Image: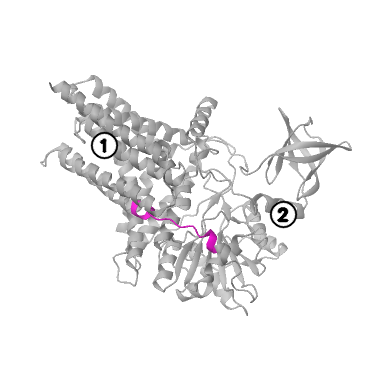
């Protein structure tokens, strides 16, 4: 009788799961992902399922409240999970709305006419970036379609060669006597210099040293200042190189960079609620607004978010233009990737504890306080819960501690349906950007330093140095990040040993644990998959510069005075790959490319279908190449996914390895 009832429960739970899967397959053809009502209904169902799940967890799966290890670990894991669900509920609420400002921009282009174009100061903050990184940013900034722009390079690295280069480019170079306040202090120094000019700018644009603006960045961002209370316009960050997760897993062409969901979907949703925030680079700010708040705040190492709060307190809105108007370098190494995110986390905690925090006495709106709290909960709960999810199963295998006491049918009915629905909704609104395993890996990679930064930042918000994210440099070698890999190796080894001992020895995990062992076994196997992929990401593969937006195009090559038409399949700052011609290494040719002209080239190596050429460009041609590669055209970011493409690329990565 008991077996019959259990089988009936299993069938019922799978029937419910099948219903959720069926709806996930049918609803995308019936609903509009941008319709507010549709989004609200979908996320409302998700929130009900989340609350249903967490109620079940709290009432039916926890150990009795007592002085036991079962109670300690069961309740502590539940507390972390409940906090994570609370963070998710806040995010789901934000995502019920979205807005696009493209039509508004089209209507208000050049709203200041017939007056002359307002003066814009494009400020490029730099510290230690390579010349090749800075050249393309400066050339791109100079190529703006807006006629009244001044480009300023703010050099905290005090480099004479950069000063000489700026002079040759007719670009204003600023160097300050000290580096106080890091990036914010550097910008504030420039604001002070500009304030002394006979004609200060009406707007300033801020670019990181590695971010190249497209020619229409300034005109389209300025269009949103037609409303006088708009103090800042933020645009998304796109990247012309893959981040470490994309690159090391071989998913550069099929899986989006880790920030894509935030910039393409979460920021437009925040904008619809009036709580979009500045992300530093790729933003334009009204001069009067930044002067009204006394420049960029220096109380937090994430001065951008804090600037939005300071502007809002003075009545100046931040709005978001979700158009690909700039592109830059994503962190190329894992250390830089993790350092950057830990810095963001620490800076947010400094804001939360500062005068513009959600619990401080200030003039912040309720929604702004919610905005900060939402970010605090994200950084504080997401990564600590990820660590707990990977470690708590070990207590069962080694010490027979039951963390989650649940049957398989209940897990399917409560957790399974909730996860299926939320994954469907998130991928429906984002064109498939939330892939469970890869998403989990991106969280796990930085979980330890980010969790540490969150806790330390809340306890001790002051006295932390600003860590610059290194960009550029030699990335041509395989590098194993042993220091980052070590905790995951240890965790994987403990998980494997614990599972084997638990499965084959009654001393550690009793064979009569029934469903509890099945649930923990599935949980453990999934963790091993996550750890395996994480270890693979820690092996950094060599990088070569690629431009994913490029398409094969016709070019001319002159060999021994004879013209040949070839296909150019890749073009970088230094090389071009051609096919349809046989050339010997070291051969000298003349090449002609659209928008650049004729120039000499040297054959570096033969390829199966052509050759790789080193370009011999004059200065004017080189700048034209930089404008072509970075200041015009579509950005190369992946903005939608296909599961088949991700599986294909991942399989190729495993085979190649």
Looking at the image, can residue 81 be seen? yes
Is 134 above or below relative to 204?
A: above
Is residue 301 in view?
no
Callout 2–callout 1 Cβ contact below 8 Å: no
What are the residue bounds of the magenta stretch?
Answer: 92-104
Residue 394 vs residue 465, the one in the foreground: 394
CA separation in Å, label 2 and label 1:
55 Å
Question: For the point 68% across and 54% down, which residue is it?
Answer: 627
Residue 567 belongs to the span the image colors magenta: no
Quickly name the residue at label 1. 392
Direction from residue 608 to residue 370 in the image, left or right: left
Instruction: Determine which residue is flagged by label 2.
Output: 623
Quarter in which the N terminus is drawn: top left
Q: Quadrant of residue 401?
A: top left
Q: Residues within 10 Å of mark 2 (few under 14, many from 20)?
A: many
Residue 278: horizontal and vertical position, in percent?
46, 61
Q: Is residue 94 magenta?
A: yes
């Amino acid at each position: 009788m008991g077996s019959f009832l259990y089988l009936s429960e299993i069938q019922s739970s799978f029937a419910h799961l099948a219903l959720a899967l069926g709806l996930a397959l049918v609803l995308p053809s019936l609903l509009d992902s941008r319709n507010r009502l549709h989004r609200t209904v979908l996320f409302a169902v998700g929130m009900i399922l989340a609350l249903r799940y967490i109620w079940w967890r709290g009432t039916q799966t926890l150990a009795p409240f007592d002085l036991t290890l079962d109670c300690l670990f069961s309740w502590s894991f539940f507390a972390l999970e409940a906090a994570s669900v609370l963070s998710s509920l806040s995010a789901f609420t934000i995502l019920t709305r979205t807005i696009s400002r493209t039509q508004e921009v089209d209507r208000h282009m050049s709203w200041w006419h017939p007056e002359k174009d307002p003066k814009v100061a494009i400020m490029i903050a730099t510290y230690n970036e390579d010349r090749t990184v800075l050249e393309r940013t400066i050339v791109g900034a100079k190529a703006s379609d807006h006629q009244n722009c001044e480009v300023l390079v703010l050099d905290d690295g005090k480099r004479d060669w950069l000063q000489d280069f700026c002079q040759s480019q007719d670009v204003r170079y600023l160097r300050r006597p000290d580096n106080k306040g890091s990036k914010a202090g550097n910008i504030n120094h420039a604001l002070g210099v500009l304030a002394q000019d006979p004609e200060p700018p009406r707007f300033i644009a801020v670019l990181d040293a590695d971010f190249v603006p497209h020619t229409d960045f300034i005109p389209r961002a300025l269009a949103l200042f037609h409303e006088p209370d708009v103090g800042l316009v933020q645009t998304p960050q796109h990247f012309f190189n893959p981040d470490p997760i994309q690159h090391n897993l071989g998913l550069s062409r099929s899986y989006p960079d880790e920030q894509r969901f935030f910039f393409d979907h979460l920021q437009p949703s925040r904008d619809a609620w009036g709580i979009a925030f500045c992300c530093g680079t790729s933003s334009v700010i009204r001069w009067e607004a930044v002067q009204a708040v006394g420049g960029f705040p220096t109380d937090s190492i994430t001065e951008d978010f804090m600037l939005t709060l300071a502007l809002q307190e003075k009545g100046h809105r931040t709005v978001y233009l979700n158009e690909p108007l700039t592109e830059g370098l994503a962190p190329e190494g894992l250390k830089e990737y993790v350092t950057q995110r830990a810095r963001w986390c620490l800076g947010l905690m400094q804001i939360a504890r500062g005068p513009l925090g959600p619990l401080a006495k200030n003039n912040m709106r309720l929604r702004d306080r919610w905005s900060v709290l939402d970010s605090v909960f994200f950084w504080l709960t997401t990564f600590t819960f990820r660590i707990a999810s990977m470690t708590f199963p070990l207590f069962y295998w080694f010490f027979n501690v039951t963390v989650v006491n649940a049957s398989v049918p209940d897990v399917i009915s409560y957790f399974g349906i909730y996860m299926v629905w939320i994954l469907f909704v998130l991928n429906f609104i984002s064109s498939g950007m939330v892939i469970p395993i890869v998403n989990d890996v991106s969280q796990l990679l930085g979980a330890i330093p980010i969790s540490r930064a969150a806790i330390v930042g809340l306890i001790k918000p002051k006295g932390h140095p600003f860590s610059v994210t290194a960009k550029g440099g030699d990335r041509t070698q395989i590098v194993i990040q042993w220091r980052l890999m070590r905790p995951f190796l240890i965790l994987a080894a403990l998980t494997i040993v614990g599972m084997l001992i638990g499965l084959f020895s009654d001393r550690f995990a009793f064979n009569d644990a029934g469903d509890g062992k099945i649930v923990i076994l599935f949980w453990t196997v999934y963790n091993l998959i996550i750890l395996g992929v994480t270890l693979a990401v820690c092996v950094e593969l060599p990088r070569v510069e690629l431009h994913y937006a490029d398409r094969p195009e016709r070019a001319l090559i002159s060999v021994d005075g004879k013209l040949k038409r070839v296909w150019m399949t890749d073009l970088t700052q230094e090389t071009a790959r051609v096919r349809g011609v046989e050339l010997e290494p070291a051969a000298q040719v003349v090449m002609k490319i659209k928008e650049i002209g004729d120039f000499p080239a040297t054959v570096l190596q033969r390829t199966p279908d052509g050759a790789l050429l080193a370009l011999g460009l004059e200065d004017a041609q080189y700048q034209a190449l930089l404008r072509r590669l970075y200041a015009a055209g579509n950005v190369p970011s992946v903005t939608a996914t296909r599961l088949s493409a991700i599986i294909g690329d991942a399989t190729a990565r495993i085979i190649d390895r």
